[in-house]
Image (spheres, coloured by chain):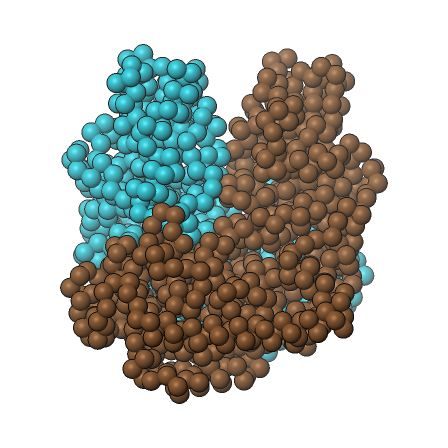
Chain colours: A brown, B cyan
């Protein structure tokens, strides 16, 4: 097919991408022209000759995924989307980086049609793509390659390859043998500070060999035939592939090859010089019709592929209607009613909430085939693997449990990719303190509105002997500060079961389940509806003089303090507040009924006090690092006793 | 010297380490015996034959640094410290993981003599060691190899090598040619989830070749001669070296080679079986005298080396007293008075605080030769490199500026290592939003009390076009939640200069400087003493009806709103609160004088509102993600106008 296109038209089409990037950055007086100008030929070959997609239906499940990991080169993607016929008119490209446009500085999932994941923070795109490739492989194993059979393509930069998260993710991809993951490495030897020789002299490609990837070296960035054959070789190999594209940053401009081409508008003189050098005769944002026609070959090809897929899917629906319906349900992300799937725990026993989470999963995993679990090498501690789960591996792609290794960051990015792909809901575990290691990906989940579920166990100083390196202090509050993340810290086993329901029913963003290592009592007072509202009166007294509000393991402590105070003639209400975000979504009247502003309130939580001023007049928290000792010693020595809670209440009440 | 020791004694000494670990974990009913049992022979050879240290003076500047990156194997280190004659009595080993002991679950810097850095969170130790090796090389270049000439040794685990941060740091170490960095890789093929084959099948050693390291393969963990010659080969090579030690986790125990040996007490039967298998005849915590004598060979050797070093240092002090005095000052971390070194900025001009930071550094860098700067590939944006700084490199080890590459996490860990080593104070820059990428190392700096300085620029939605992926929202508050971290967000150029002084004078922990991308006015109202107190009344009015408290770029906005309100007959005070932590260290009377509890107070900060309830009755903040557009559009559309501030004040005052 490529043979039908003249070399002149190819050049024109490639230069269209370059000039669009140059002009949009010039107009915005902001942005990154260098990468799009260097990688335009690669993108052109991929998008016009290989990429299987249907610009009229960006949600078609079997489309190839394209991830611009080097998200600062967003104009390359916007140019491709526009030229290929996505719903992204030229007017939006003119409004690059302007308020309300569809063309923000970095590509944003859910904001612009055809953007598969939000990129910009380096390393995230490639690592998320690993998750997409996992999902593809798994879904194909589950539903058959007639219905699921696509590639995941990535353009990654030097910066992506320097970030540790891509090292983790690439090692995992090699381990899992994700052969349909194809990465174009924009090997342009330039980063913001200058030449990569300043900081990045390792043999990157040898490193990828070490990860178990196919490495395709020295593909000249202007050599379309070489790019074409590299893609074919990548498709043919059972390993993930990295293609080293020796591109020239800012190709065609006077700044070509210079790190100054990386970002910022080049100025009218250089723009004019680039136009002259590339022989581009059109004014800004004018694209000749033949260029559109050239790119829209893919539209026709995509529609054909889509139609053929549709026919295969209809055949499946005829032959196996339940299977087809299940595929539809899974791709639409619709859940069955979970209430009946939730376990009930009998009051009186003692159970760590991480153990309750494990038992809840034992019920949910069979009920929800879309659940894909995992842990960053803390499976026995996180209680994330149920007995009937098999491991996902190179040889068992139907397995539902992923051993991510000690790679928290790649785990979180891959979880995002698995969930973004469609067909699956990913959850993954680590210790709460190590949420720090995966925070950039967790933030992206929140920004994208992707409902990944993070299982954070060992949630306070009460983890005991492992000491301050492993004891979270600031983590709860610093997670609560992230917009659109739900943080749920259940008080007991039954609150934990409801927390899972809330996390899975949520479709608008991620949820962090924050769970104890230590056993806590199963409370008779739990109200499921109250948990779902984020907070509720778990234990009322007639005419309360005050209130104790707590979360997680501190709720049972608050109940003990309540009883102690009652013996002393002091009546206080106890409120369980497992999920601030859900609670803040309740009507003011409900919130005021649970936590009346007039009622003197003490907050009790084994974590940083900062932020509790929102709900409480005094706080029993921890504003220093923890200590290594058996759990009762640490917990009690740091002030978490019913006597201390009672004393704080009395001080607050002035009695 | 090794020839003088019989094989029987060697075995006894090695088994002493194993049994100490086994018994301590058994006594604590918690801990990790497997790694110490596997790596005891390597540690024995290193500590008795190679390590240059003086247990009587753990602070001797030219000691070799030993970092147990696999910090969960802490009993290996405690055993070595005890047996080698550090001030760590047997009684402390008996109290492993108990409240108040010197033997916490993971090694803690500043808590136990001889512990060079806190480890446990995987990847941190090795990455911090890279910083130590940078400091050694630099200090040797500056003061001569007669005074500075030591190795940095690391024991790292599979988990360390899986973490992305070590990939970043190892790439940097190879790039910089840190030949005196020697890593023992405990290649035992076991992690918590089971065999490393579950998740970690890459060719780790080929990866280290790609980083430019010397790779020494297949050293059998029980072969002392092989270990010895591997160390010699590592010392001789100009590249950093990794020695693959094929150890057996839990060696000698019935769980040898099994992932169940990784953690937890083995129980009395297995402990007895291990004693029998190793031929260990002594009760728990009884060590035969000849074992002590064997380990304390190093004490004598260390004292000799120390004495020789002292003689060389005295000779230097005679010949070049100023140079010797400077070395002492640098190692003691004493700063000259900085007040005269600080620039003064004239009120009226407009200057981004990142630019003011750059100008402050132009004064500080010549005055403080201990300052070592750097950036994670954002040098032109972070303003971290002054014109007279040369780059630190393989060929220019005296250079004072480090291009860390796009490796925020390794940068932070290396900064910790540089500062821990002594002789230097490291600062490094990235965007505030990317503080997420380096949070685990930043937390360790706070936990250790290491005064590294983080330069976080582009500190709000006001960075504009780069959009929500680059716009911090929750970061300020989630940094403030970290214990022992000072977060300073200066209002203008002069507050920025003072912020630098505060950061450098601080010796108890790290400081984050949070700086604007956009220009802000230089304010006539700044009071340096008030900045140092963390907060002060920057603009008073007679009989204030209310108060606006703000930080950073929002202080000038608050002043504008104050003027607007005054025109409307409403008098409000404006408070600048650049550093909460310093402010909270002030007497209550001062704090109440600045922010009287009775004065209705509005907080204004372009970030998450959570936490501002501590100081304010209402907050103008941002509790959602930002948007891509030119800065004035984002800033104003998200509500940061003087009119909106004034309206919020009026609503608060009910006028």
Q: Residue furthest front?
A: A289
> In the rendering, at what x and y percent does residue A541 appear?
74, 20
As drawn, B25 above or below B518: below
At 41% from the left edge and 31% from the top edge, which residue is drawn? B620
Q: Nearer the viewer, residue A592 or B546?
A: A592
Question: Which of the two residues, A579 or B1, is positioned nearer the viewer here?
Answer: A579
* Left-right relation of B164 to B352: right
Q: Residue B573 sits in which quadrant?
A: top left
Residue A90 drawn above or below residue A136: above
**Does residue B232 appear in the picture of this structure?**
no
**A619 or A533, which lies in front?**
A533
User: Residue A518's quadrant in the figure?
Assistant: top right
Identity of the residue drawn at 74% across and 26% down: A539
Picture coordinates of residue B12, whole percent (x, y): 65, 68
- In the image, residue B1 sits, relative to residue B267, either above or below, namely below
Q: Is residue B358 left or right of residue A353?
A: left
A272 and B203: which one is in front? A272
Residue B253: percent from the left, percent from the top?
73, 67
Q: Residue at x 53, y 29 (%)?
A: A614
Rendering quarter of residue B486: top left
Q: Is residue A467 left or right of residue A542?
A: left
């Amino acid at each position: 097919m490529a043979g039908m296109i003249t070399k002149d038209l190819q050049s024109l089409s490639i230069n269209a991408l370059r000039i669009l990037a140059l002009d949009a950055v010039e107009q915005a007086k902001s942005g990154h022209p260098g990468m799009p100008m260097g990688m335009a030929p690669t993108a052109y070959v991929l998008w016009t000759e290989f990429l299987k997609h249907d610009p009229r239906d960006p949600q078609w499940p079997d489309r190839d995924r394209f991830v611009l990991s080097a998200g600062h080169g967003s104009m390359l993607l916007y140019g491709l989307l526009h030229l290929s016929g996505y719903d992204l008119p030229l007017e939006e490209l003119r409004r690059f980086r302007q308020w309300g446009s569809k063309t923000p500085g970095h590509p944003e999932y859910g904001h612009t049609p055809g953007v598969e994941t939000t990129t910009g923070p380096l390393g995230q795109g490639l690592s998320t793509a690993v998750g997409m490739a996992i999902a593809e492989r798994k879904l194909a194993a589950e539903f058959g390659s007639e219905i699921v059979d696509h590639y995941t393509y990535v353009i990654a930069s030097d910066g992506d390859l320097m970030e540790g998260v891509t090292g983790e993710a690439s090692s995992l991809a090699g381990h899992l043998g994700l052969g349909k993951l194809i990465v174009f490495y924009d090997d342009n030897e330039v980063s913001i500070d200058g030449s990569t020789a300043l900081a990045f002299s390792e043999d990157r490609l040898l490193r990828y060999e070490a990860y178990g990837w196919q490495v395709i070296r020295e593909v000249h960035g202007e050599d379309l035939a070489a790019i074409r054959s590299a893609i074919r070789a990548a498709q043919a190999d059972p390993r993930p592939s990295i293609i080293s594209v020796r591109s020239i940053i800012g190709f065609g401009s006077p700044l070509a090859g210079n790190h100054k081409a990386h970002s910022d508008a080049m100025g009218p003189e250089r723009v004019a010089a680039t136009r002259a050098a590339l022989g581009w005769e059109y004014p800004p944002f004018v694209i000749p019709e033949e260029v559109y026609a050239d790119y829209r070959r893919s539209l026709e090809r995509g529609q054909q592929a889509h139609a053929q897929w549709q026919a295969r899917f209809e055949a499946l629906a005829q032959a196996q209607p339940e299977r087809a319906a299940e595929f539809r349900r899974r791709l639409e992300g619709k859940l069955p009613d979970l209430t009946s799937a939730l376990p009930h725990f009998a009051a009186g026993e003692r159970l760590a909430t991480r153990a309750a989470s494990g038992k809840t999963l034992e019920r949910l995993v069979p009920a929800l085939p879309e659940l894909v679990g995992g842990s960053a090498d803390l499976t026995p501690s996180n209680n994330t693997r149920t007995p009937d789960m098999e491991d996902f591996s190179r040889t068992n792609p139907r397995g539902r449990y992923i051993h991510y290794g000690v790679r928290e960051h790649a785990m979180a990015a891959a979880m995002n990719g698995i969930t973004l792909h469609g067909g699956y809901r990913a959850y993954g575990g680590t210790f709460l303190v190590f949420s720090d290691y995966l925070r950039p990906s967790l933030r992206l989940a929140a920004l994208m509105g992707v409902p990944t579920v993070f299982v954070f166990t060992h949630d306070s100083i009460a983890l005991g002997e492992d000491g301050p390196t492993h004891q979270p202090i600031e983590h709860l509050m610093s997670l609560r500060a992230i917009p659109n993340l739900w943080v749920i810290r259940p008080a007991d086993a039954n609150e934990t079961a409801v927390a899972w329901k809330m996390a899975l029913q949520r479709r608008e963003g991620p949820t962090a389940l924050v769970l104890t290592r230590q056993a806590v009592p199963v409370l008779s007072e739990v109200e499921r509806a109250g948990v779902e509202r984020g907070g509720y009166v778990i234990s009322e007294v007639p005419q309360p003089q005050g209130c104790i509000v707590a979360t997680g393991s501190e709720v049972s402590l608050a109940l003990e303090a309540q009883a102690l105070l009652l013996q002393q003639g002091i009546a206080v209400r106890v409120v369980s507040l497992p999920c601030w975000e859900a609670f803040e979504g309740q009507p003011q009247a409900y919130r005021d009924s649970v936590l009346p502003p007039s009622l003197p309130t003490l907050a009790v939580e084994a974590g940083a006090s900062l932020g509790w001023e929102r709900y409480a007049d005094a706080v029993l928290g921890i504003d220093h690092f923890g200590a290594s000792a058996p759990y009762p010693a640490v917990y009690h020595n740091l002030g978490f006793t019913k006597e201390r809670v009672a004393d704080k209440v009395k001080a607050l009440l002035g009695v």
